[in-house]
Structure formats: structure tokens, C-alpha cells
Image (cartoon, rainbow, N blue to C red):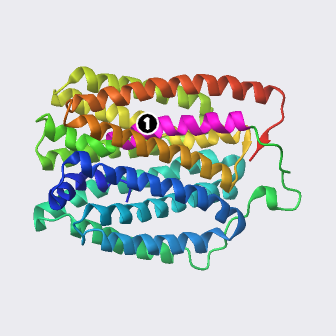
């Protein structure tokens, strides 16, 4: 679901008779819906059994994926993307929160495993969209096949007991005052790195075509290579999470992201450099999200509301950066996309330095905060 919009964007723009600049509003719509869904979802999962909520959201999303290819008006598609974004947030908040509640202090490798399978879907969907366009002349069948896949996944939740929040169990950890500085820093950190993760995956297809690096079919493979590198990295990170602390893994990831984006910027229109940059960035950005949640759990008790706020930060980053790239992509040139993402990642590293300093101070007094 998360990776279908990028490969579909040129076809959607042509169908609606608008430029990519206008069609990029769909990125903003998805992420605005995601923001609202994230705010609402955390409260729901803190109050109700999680698995029935997951089942209902999956079925609703399947319905949206069936409807999206039908209209050709931008306003209608914006509304549908708002709904899809809200449902995606609900699933993300629920999946990540419930996994932490289930595995507690041993969650780190399981969290990487969860995000590994997110990457598997992101590999398959650009190829699915490209093949749908190639065989039928339309992206519609790609969306409809994804909708069919969602139904049996939803049914799997039926009858499975939902995990319980640790702080709600007898003898569970009591709630403490919220450390808002720490919460806000984590939100900003999530916003910064998720912005690059989503923007690169969403725009590399159009970038490759605009710079004559690849024809559409190869550009789709390049997009899948990005998500493939991301997925392979998450697979390899599962044993690494058992050996290294989250802070160590985060430092390695951030250095790799800077290296990948620098290669893309220096490489310009060189196919070899762009392919290398895509793989390096995909490998590096892969584990930032799951490792950051594990990093946060060392100091903060993970609740549905805390996870919601992290996804709100992620949504804001994912909403603003792809839209910002769209404003300069055609007027300034496709190279502006790489400049914008590199600047964002430098800011992300600065936030991490401040976050680590504040977190270290909180850990030193041995009073973990809770949200």
C-alpha cells in the first residue's frame, strides 16, 4: 500500500490531465490522512482490543483500493487518499504498539522482522503496478490485486487474543509524568528520517525518467531495488539487533543515509551512481524506524499514544518533503530532489545528537518517563 503511489503518479497525473506538481498533492493527502489516523489510532488501541480494530481497518483499506482507480477527478482522489492514509496510520500504530506489548523488552529483533515484511510488500508493489500498466495499459489491476490480498490477511486476526498493555496489567509499570522535551525530540527525529525514506521511494521513479537514466519499466525496477535493499537490510538487522545496542545501529544508519544521498547528488545523471546511491540509502534507512522505537523504549514506556505521536511526526515529514520536492521538480530540475533530501538528512543527524544528549541525561537519573 505504501509504495504504490510513486509508480502510479505519472499515470494518475495523465489521467487527470494535471502536471506532476498538482498530482503531488496526493502525497500530501495520504500523509494528512495518516496524521489524523495516527492521532486517533493510539487512543483507540489504548482503550479497545487491538486485533478486531486491525481486521476492520484492513477490510476498509481493501475497499478503498478497489475504488481509487475509478474516478479521474483530482479532488475525489485527494479525498480517497485521505481515507487510505488514515487507515494506513491505524494499521501502523496498531501493529507496532501491539508488537511491543507482546514481546516487551525482547521486542528489538521482532520489530525489525515486522518492518522487514513491510519492505517485502514495498518491493512487490512497484513491480505489480508496472506490470499492470504494461499488460493492460492501466494501473488499476495493480490496485485491485492488492485489495484482494488484504482480505485473507484481515481474516487471520479473527479469534486471536489481543496483547495487553504492560502498564494496564496487575503489577504493571505505573504511569509517570510525561517528559515532553524527549517526546518532541523523538517526534522531530521520526519526521526527519521518514521524510527521506518516503520521498526517495516516491520520487526515484520520476527522477530516473526525467534525467533519462531509465525507461519506465527500468525505473520501476530501480524503485523496487530501493525497497529491496531496504528489505534485505531489515532481514540482516534481526541478528544484529541481538548483538548491538540501538544507539550504535542508529549511528551507522545515519552515516549510511548521508553517504547514499551524497552519491546521488554527486552522481547526477549517471545510472551507475544512482543505482549505487539507491542501494546504499535503502540499506541505511531501512532500520531507522524499528531501531528508533527500540531506542525510545529504553527511556519511555511505549503506549498507543506515544506510538501515535511518533507516527504523527513521521506523517508530517512524509507529507511535507515529497510535496516540497514536487514544487521544484519541474521548475528547477529533478536534481533539486536530491539536494532537498540531503539537507533534510543533515538536520536529522543534528536532531539525533541533541536527542542522544537529552536521553543520556534522563537515563543517568534512572527515572524512565512514560507517556
Q: Residue furthest front?
A: 75
Task: Name the image quarter holding residue 96.
Answer: bottom right
Q: Give residue 322's position: percent from left, percent from top.
A: 35, 42
Q: Residue at x 59, y 56 (%)?
A: 39
- Total of numbered circles in the picture? 1
Quarter occupied by the N terminus: bottom left
Q: Give how far across and how far down residue 219 sits, in percent.
A: 18, 44
Residue 114 shown left or right of residue 132 in the figure: right
Q: Is residue 334 magenta?
A: no
Residue 214 in the image: state x and y as whole percent.
13, 40
Q: Is residue 273 left or right of residue 31?
A: left
Figure check: 281 above or below 142: above
The residue lying toward the viewer, choosing from 257 and 14, is 14
> Helix, strand, or loop for circle 1?
helix
In front of the other: 322 or 259: 322
Residues drawn in magenta = 180-200
Residue at 26% x, 29% y: name it.
336
Point 48% across, 35% down: residue: 192
Residue 286 visible, this angle: no
The reply to whether residue 312 is visible in this rendering is yes
The quadrant in which residue 179 appears is top right
Q: Residues within 10 Å of mark 1 (few under 14, many from 20)?
A: many
The residue at 31%/26% (across/down) is 339
Prevailing secondary structure class for the magenta stretch in the rendered image? helix
- Residue 76 relative to residue 349: left or right: left
Left or right of 337 in this view: 47: right
Residue indicated by mark 1: 285
Amino acid at each position: 500500500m505504501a509504495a504504490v503511489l510513486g509508480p502510479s503518479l505519472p499515470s494518475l497525473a495523465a489521467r487527470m490531465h494535471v502536471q506532476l506538481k498538482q498530482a503531488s498533492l496526493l502525497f500530501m493527502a495520504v500523509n494528512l490522512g495518516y496524521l489524523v489516523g495516527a492521532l486517533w489510532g493510539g487512543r483507540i488501541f489504548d482503550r479497545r482490543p487491538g486485533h478486531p480494530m486491525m481486521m476492520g481497518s484492513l477490510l476498509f483499506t481493501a475497499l478503498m483500493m478497489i475504488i481509487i482507480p475509478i474516478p479521474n477527478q483530482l479532488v475525489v482522489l485527494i479525498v480517497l487518499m485521505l481515507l487510505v492514509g488514515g487507515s494506513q496510520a491505524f494499521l501502523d500504530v496498531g501493529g507496532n504498539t501491539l508488537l511491543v506489548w507482546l514481546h516487551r523488552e525482547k521486542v528489538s529483533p521482532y520489530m525489525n522482522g515486522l518492518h522487514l515484511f513491510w519492505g517485502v510488500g514495498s518491493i512487490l508493489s512497484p513491480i505489480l503496478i508496472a506490470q499492470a500498466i504494461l499488460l493492460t495499459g492501466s494501473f488499476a489491476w495493480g490496485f485491485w490485486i492488492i485489495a484482494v490480498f488484504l482480505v485473507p490477511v484481515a481474516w487471520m486476526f479473527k479469534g486471536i487474543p489481543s496483547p495487553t498493555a504492560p502498564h494496564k496489567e496487575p503489577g504493571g509499570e505505573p504511569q509517570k509524568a510525561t517528559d515532553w522535551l524527549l517526546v518532541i525530540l523523538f517526534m522531530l527525529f521520526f519526521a526527519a528520517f521518514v521524510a527521506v525514506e518516503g520521498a526517495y521511494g516516491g520520487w526515484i521513479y520520476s527522477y530516473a525518467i526525467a534525467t533519462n537514466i531509465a525507461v519506465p519499466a527500468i525505473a520501476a525496477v530501480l524503485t523496487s531495488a530501493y525497497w529491496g535493499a531496504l528489505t534485505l537490510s531489515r532481514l540482516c538487522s534481526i541478528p544484529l539487533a541481538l548483538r548491538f545496542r540501538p544507539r550504535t545501529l542508529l549511528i551507522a544508519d545515519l552515516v549510511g543515509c548521508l553517504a547514499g544521498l551524497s552519491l546521488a547528488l554527486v552522481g547526477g545523471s549517471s545510472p551507475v551512481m544512482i543505482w549505487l546511491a539507491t542501494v546504499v540509502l535503502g540499506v541505511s534507512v531501512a532500520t531507522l524506524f524499528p531501531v528508533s522505537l527500540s531506542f525510545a523504549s529504553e527511556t519511555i514506556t511505549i503506549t498507543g499514544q506515544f506510538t501515535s505521536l511518533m507516527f504523527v511526526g513521521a506523517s508530517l515529514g512524509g507529507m511535507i518533503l515529497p510535496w516540497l520536492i514536487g514544487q521544484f521538480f519541474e521548475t528547477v530540475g529533478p536534481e533539486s530532489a536530491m539536494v532537498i533530501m540531503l539537507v533534510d538528512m543533515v538536520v536529522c543527524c543534528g536532531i539525533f545528537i541533541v536527542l542522544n544528549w537529552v536521553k543520556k541525561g534522563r537515563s543517568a537519573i534512572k527515572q524512565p518517563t512514560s507517556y
